[in-house]
Image: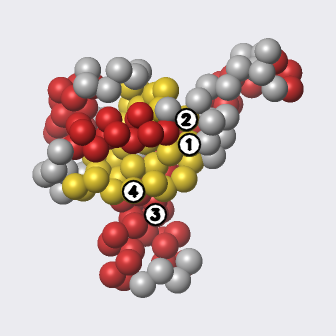
Amino acid sequence: MSGYGARPMPGRMLGLDLGERRIGVAISDEMGLIASPLTMVPRQGPVVKDVRELIDRYGIVRLVVGMPVGLSGREGPQAIATRTYAESIRGEFGVPLDYWDERMTSSIAEQHLIASGVRRGKRKQQVDAVAAAVMLQGYLDNQRFRGERGR
């Protein structure tokens, strides 16, 4: 048994916001409650190796990839490209992969960084990881809500 109420710990999750040039990376806590920005991985570099190292270092049990759906909720060309890319590298990681709506996450991240007083130059370096954290937090909140409703 683990912890109060004998609820097993789900383990850490890694959120990936796949951009054309950069991949924002966020991580959850071990209880799957809080997402935090972690890093940014250049898309042109050894992406699989870099993500694999993060999975191993942090004991990741699940990947959550942001799905860029339109405001209408439909998947367009960008969503298809994201799914195609994620599926092409999925087998390299050995952990389950889920997709989650990333609508508006970059805007939310940008506004958060502005409100926090982060200067423009620094915002460019941080916005991808913060957007990944916003996306992952939405996923975590949904999972917790669904779990509480299922009791």
- Give how far across and how far down residue 85 sits, in percent: 19, 34
Q: Are marks 2 and 4 in contact (CB under 8 Å)?
A: no
Residue that carries the numbered disc 2 in the rendered image: 12
Q: Residue 109 — which label?
A: 3
Q: Secondary structure at mark 2?
A: strand
Query: Alpha carbon of mark 1 to alpha carbon of mark 3: how far?
Result: 17 Å
Query: Alpha carbon of mark 3 to alpha carbon of mark 2: how far?
Result: 21 Å
The crowd level at tag 2 (other Cα within 10 Å; few <14, some 14-19, many 20+) is many
Residue that carries the numbered disc 4 in the rendered image: 39
Residue that carries the numbered disc 1 in the rendered image: 28
Work out whether 68 lies above or below 107: above
* Mark 1 or 3: the one toward you: 1
112 or 47: which is nearer to us?
47
Q: Secondary structure at mark 3?
A: helix
Residue at 18% of width from left, 26% of height from top? 88
Q: Secondary structure at mark 1?
A: strand
Taking the view exactly as shown, the residue that stands out farthest to the left is: 44
**Mark 2 / mark 4, whichever is N-terminal:** 2
The crowd level at tag 3 (other Cα within 10 Å; few <14, some 14-19, many 20+) is many
Left or right position of 80 against 100: left
Residue at 47% of width from left, 80% of height from top? 118
- Give how far across and how far down residue 41 sits, in percent: 28, 53
**Mark 4 / mark 1, whichever is N-terminal:** 1
Query: Alpha carbon of mark 4 to alpha carbon of mark 1: how far?
Result: 13 Å
**Mark 3 / mark 2, whichever is N-terminal:** 2
The crowd level at tag 4 (other Cα within 10 Å; few <14, some 14-19, many 20+) is some
